[in-house]
Image (tube, coloured by chain):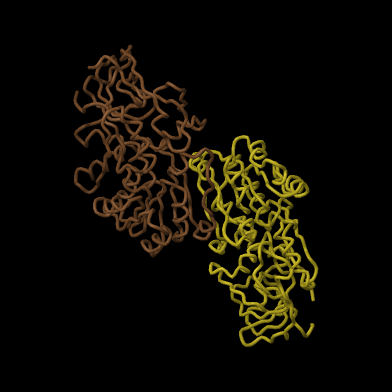
Chain colours: A yellow, B brown
Amino acid sequence: MADRNQRITFARSPKGLPVPEDFGADETPIPTPGPGQFLSRTVYLSLDPYYRNVMKNSPIYADRLAPGDVMVGETVAQVVESRHADYAPGDYIAVRNGWQQYALSSGQGVRRLDPLIAPVSTALGVLGMPGLTGWAGTVHLGQPLPGETVVVSACTGPVGSTAGQVARHMGARVVGIAGSAEKCDYAVRELGFTACVNHKDGDLAAALKAACPRGIDLYFDNVGGATLQAVIANLAMGARIVLCGMIEAYSMDSPPPGPWLGPVVGARATMKGLVVYDHMHRMAEMERVVSGWIREGSFRYREDVAEGLASAPAAFCTLMRGQNFGKALVRVGPERA
Amino acid sequence: MADRNQRITFARSPKGLPVPEDFGADETPIPTPGPGQFLSRTVYLSLDPYYRNVMKNSPIYADRLAPGDVMVGETVAQVVESRHADYAPGDYIAVRNGWQQYALSSGQGVRRLDPLIAPVSTALGVLGMPGLTGWAGTVHLGQPLPGETVVVSACTGPVGSTAGQVARHMGARVVGIAGSAEKCDYAVRELGFTACVNHKDGDLAAALKAACPRGIDLYFDNVGGATLQAVIANLAMGARIVLCGMIEAYSMDSPPPGPWLGPVVGARATMKGLVVYDHMHRMAEMERVVSGWIREGSFRYREDVAEGLASAPAAFCTLMRGQNFGKALVRVGPERA
């Protein structure tokens, strides 16, 4: 065990898309657990678009950052030293260690991981908060019926690929939206979507019309912006739109206008905001069902792993430009120490 | 009975807000009913904002107009001559006679009126399609709970005043939005709203925040645009927005952008499009309940009546500028011939 704790810190709020200079780095002593605490070693750091919002220091987020603070974030970690009755060295956990190699925890908000049901890295992706987001938004909010057409944006990411594959398992016809031919190919070949539209290929509304001839019954929106507008132009009667993420806006100082809502009225459509924290009680149900699909081979996922904590800022900037392919992770340390 | 039928015709699609020159006028012979038909004499013509959309000749509306066609529209009429088994001279009906003094009907889509339950003019307002719109959007879509804060825009019109008064009867705290101090005064004094905000008085979002300290639980949206954006800035958790009308956009050639939807996600809000034609089966229920409230004095309405068919184009232009006060009607002929 190293005797220093490497950390990536918050340096400043980005202007527009983040750049590596928005982050700092330092080293601190590895802390020692007090009574009721344990120390864990970070194995994987999750990179998620919402961090960009946290870096705005907006009052809508609970996490506020001062320059020099360690960046917040979800991690998979292994317990190395414990004075907590429920956690023993060697245990794998999902915990908010942030962008650093070691952290203390009192156990609050910690989720124990079983490395036998799936690789532990999935606890940050399809079997973690992103997966729960896709699961809850599809199963509980969107409720696709067999034969309905479901469209999912950012469809090769952990939220979108879960939403789309869950909808496929519910009998729906799934059409993805992604930002490259390679991602679209993966969505059809690996994720089992009926079709996938590259939003960089010209007229998205026309491409969706061609791919969804009976209209779109359910749209799981991970991006907002022009993509949402193109979907709204193609709604079926009684359509539902689950508003989940608006990544296009996260790097803007002031919010952009939204879509013209006239067609929402015409289609008698429903738009519903999804916040995953409302659905934490569904984590076990999601984990049980989706991990079963993973083991039987009917549910795929893809990870885009950067090596070493120092690569985290650049990997995050890549994510915010949509240039990652799969769940963005940083391997901070080996899976087994 | 006159021997000529005066008509107001469609001349051209307006550019922006309509002007009287967008209409024409002519006279035709009064038609004679064939077997299974009746002739009725128009008493009241309803003026409704959606006519502006019909005048666009957009394919989303079933009614398409060619220059010289009589303008379409809802009317209250009295049967004058009948070869239809169900209708006799003297009967009052709600019928789509359009902007003319006389028209034939086969009875399709006709609603028989009982002049004893309320003045027949209300069949075009609070006891007609506008009232049904406010009723269905509130009772069946918005479903306000006792003590919730309900905001209604265009709140002195027939849709808004019905939505707001229905919400009040359901135990909600109702805050109106209107475009003049006089209308706001009426909303509080006559309609029983807790408060009413004049959207022409500066910062609407701040005024709504002051009037709705616990946030807005239900918004019945009759206007869209900047008003919708100001409401979205003040949503309570679990808020519902019923999207009903977007009058600000009806006079535009291409649809304007909509609101930034970020706060909809944060509030876990639901937005739902309302089209009144889906709720025609609820007309009898609405008429029974609301007419009872009218007779007992716990539900008010206001009409803005222009005299004579020739005044209809100017009255419609006034409506589209928000300068009417109450349900816009044209008295085409006397109630009793």
On screen, residue B228 above or below A118: above
Where residue B221 appears, x then y in whole percent?
Answer: 42, 48
| Camera-nearest residue between B165 and B181 | B181
Q: Is residue B173 above or below residue B292?
A: below
Can residue B60 be seen at all in this image of the molecule? Answer: yes
Residue visible at 78% across and 85% down in the picture: A3
Residue at 28% across / 29% down in the picture? Answer: B76
Q: Quadrant of residue A324?
A: bottom right
Is B205 left or right of B35, judged from the image as shown? right
Figure quadrant of residue B49: top left
Q: Does the rendering let one see residue A90?
A: no
What is the count of numbered marks? 0
Q: Position of residue A80 (x, y in %)?
A: 73, 80
Q: Position of residue B331 (x, y in %)?
A: 26, 30
Quadrant for the N terminus of chain A, please. Answer: bottom right
At horizontal 24% and vertical 16% (from top left) the residue drawn is: B2
Q: Is residue B337 left or right of residue A325?
A: left
In-front residue for pair A276/A58: A58
Q: Nearer the viewer, residue B68 or B77?
A: B68
- From what the image shows, is residue B287 above or below residue A137? above
